[in-house]
Image (tube, grey):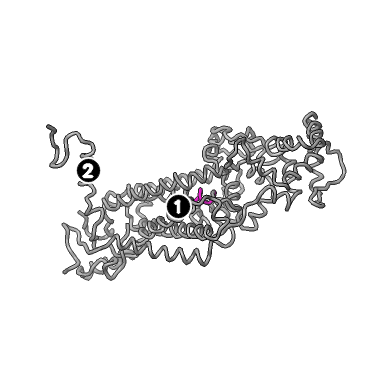
Amino acid sequence: MSEKIAPDVEAGSWTGAIRQRLATGLPIERLLPDRQPIYVGSWVYVFGVITIAALIWVIGSGVVLALFGPQWWHTTSAGRFFNSLHFWSVQVFFVFMVLHLWGQFFMASWRNGRAPTWMIGAVTFLISILAAFTGYLAQQNLDAQWIGVNAKDAVNSSGLGGFFNVLNFGQMYGLHVMLVPIAVTVLVVIHIVQVRVRGVVAPMDAPREES
Amino acid sequence: MSTIERAGAIRTAPYDLVKELLIALAGTLALILVLAAVLSSPDVPSVTIQSWAQKQPVDLVTTATGELAGSTVSAGYGAPYNNGSGSVQKLGFFTPQSWAGTRLSVDPAQDFVLKPLQAASATNPDLAAALSQYNGASDSQRSGWLDAYSKALKDAKEENGQVVVAKGDYGPLLVMMASLLQIARAGALDGYLLSRGGFYQTDYTRPLLFMGDGSYLSSLAEDQHLLGNQWGMMNETGSYPGQTWLWLYTLWYQIAPYNGNANADLMVVLTMLVLSLALVMVPFIPGVRDIPRWIPIQRLIWRRYYVEERSGQTERPAGGVTGSSVPSGS
């Protein structure tokens, strides 16, 4: 008969250990709280959630564009409209992500053990720039041609040109519609979980209110 | 029921994160729909070698002649395309471009000019004879023809789609370039430069390098304020916002010691690498991490909290979509 290390976890069970770790580290009450600290009351807090909302529309419109293929938006009005949705959702995404970043900087949100949250957020910003860059290269229009012809010199100077060829549409398109969006999405999920685990940072001059 | 509770040392108030996200989704969708419907999105058609040949045949022939003479950017580029050194950047001993080596082999004279002409010569005896003469000539003979033809092209004119130059000893070049222009105008050169032997093609390295060597593509980019000295990196065609988030990257190209420097790209890449790393490591950099205390914008962000703390008012909700104030975010 197997031994139990906790009331509902079998000894030696990796699955049970992970479940127990999640249950103690990220209980559902912390993941989806219905209350927040009293100091959570500024429009700055809205920038993050708007960034997430815009990202959802970026991905949604991008999925439609990917479904119909890279030529579709050049030749149909429906395609052009979905490209416009994609274009403007990207603009909104970046505007609010930058506002979120500046807001969190001036709130010094890395305090009290939240440095990893800041670091993942900053990496997400940088990977998002890569996502947008590959998107601009995958447009198949004059803008994409010119960006590619110019950007190759910077990429080549770093020694990466032979591996990350900005003139190779297939490579840029594959990166843009699959690999980089997955990276951004995973990083955003990790970032949100980090925020939920640590909670929202308290005001700098507040007495220590955090548990 | 009171909205304020104490959980240990933390005072909390009701807050509906899910409702907040749904409102944000609806709000951003409305904004994006309006922007897309009213402003659409930019899409200036791509340039083809065919359109280049039709609009500026002299530039195309001049570029092709430069490829044969080895005087174009691509011809002397260096890694990752060939063994040249003209575009290889370095800072002292640090030259990652050279270290990476030639990984995307491109021989502009052969790939952009001679191989397409060889393919076209199968049905063109005059071209076949011209190619035979060119390939059989000595290096000095070819250099003489190319030098004379390059000089003549500076005063060349376009007549009925043909490039006309003053009479001179250009050897087989007149026939070769007339043929190249002919297949380019027909659109065949676009397909030939794209082809790598298979049926499906997605790699535009060769046609883009060839077009980049000419001045037609850059003249169109200049019209769209996309050149490097026009902050082109962050611009978009038309009057649309582009990659404005690249403003810092673009900035370096506008100022000394980066602007006009032969190694500017490498310098900018390294600068941005350091700054990107610094952004990630802000929590650990003394001075930078203290800026929020020196510039107390946080007093504005948490203004209401500080006011309530001072006045001792703690019985109002923190806000959010269930309260009277603004919501929380992640």
Which label sits on residue A13? none
- At 57% from the left edge and 55% from the top edge, which residue is drawn? A74
Q: Are marks 2 and 1 on the same chain?
A: yes
Which numbered disc, 2 or 1, marks the residue that appears first in the sequence? Answer: 2
- Mark 1 belongs to which amino acid? Val
Q: Which residue is mark 1?
A: A63
Compared with residue B209, is residue B36 higher up or lower down, i.e. above or below? below
- Mark 2 belongs to which amino acid? Arg
* Magenta-colored segment: predominant secondary structure: helix
Q: Residues within 10 Å of mark 1 (few under 14, many from 20)?
A: some
Q: Which residue is mark 2?
A: A19
Q: Quadrant of the C terminus of chain B?
A: bottom left
Q: Which residues are magenta?
A: A132-137
Specify whether B135 is left or right of A202.
right
Q: Residues within 10 Å of mark 2 (few under 14, many from 20)?
A: some
Q: Residue furthest right?
A: B167
Image quadrant assignment for residue B20? bottom left
Residue A154 visible somewhere in the drawing:
no
Which chain does the residue under circle 2 lie in?
Answer: A
Image quadrant assignment for residue B222? bottom right
Q: Quadrant of the N terminus of chain B?
A: bottom left
